[in-house]
Image (cartoon, grey):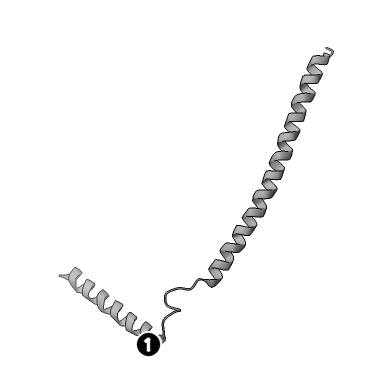
């Protein structure tokens, strides 16, 4: 069955549209990957600069805080045992 000229033109037109879309998606994907890399680097830098609450206090304050927490745990345990 021979392909008519109209069918061939329609096919070529649709194929060209698909190629255009694929090119657009590849470009968009490349841009998104680049942005993702930048955001990952930014997050990594933020995590490096981040510290927990215990790194900013001295050893004596940590011991005092541990003592307070242990005291609270004992009070809770006594309350639950009653």
Q: Image height check: is 77 above or below 16?
A: below
Screen quadrant of the N terminus? top right
- Residue ID for mark 1: 60
Q: Quadrant of residue 12?
A: top right
Image position of 82 with respect to 31: above or below: below
The part of the image, by quadrant, that contains residue 11 is top right
Q: In the image, is 68 to the left or to the right of 2?
A: left
In terms of depth relative to the viewer, which is nearer, 6 or 75? 6
Q: Position of residue 80 (x, y in %)?
A: 20, 68
Name which residue lies at 63% across and 59% down. 38
Of 82 and 16, the residue lying toward us = 16
Q: Can you say whether 73 is above or below 30 in the image?
A: below
Measuring from the top left, give residue 42's x and y in whole percent. Answer: 59, 63
Residue appearing at x 54%, y 67% in the figure: 46
Q: Residue at x 77, y 20 (%)?
A: 10
Give the percent coordinates (x, y) of residue 64.
Answer: 32, 84
């Amino acid at each position: 069955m021979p392909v008519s000229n109209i069918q061939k033109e329609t096919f070529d037109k649709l194929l060209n549209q698909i190629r255009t879309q694929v090119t657009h998606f590849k470009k968009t994907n490349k841009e998104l990957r680049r942005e993702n890399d930048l955001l990952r680097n930014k997050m990594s830098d933020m995590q490096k600069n981040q510290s927990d609450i215990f790194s900013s206090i001295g050893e004596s304050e940590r011991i005092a805080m541990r003592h307070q927490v242990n005291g609270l745990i004992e009070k809770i345990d006594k309350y639950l045992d009653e």
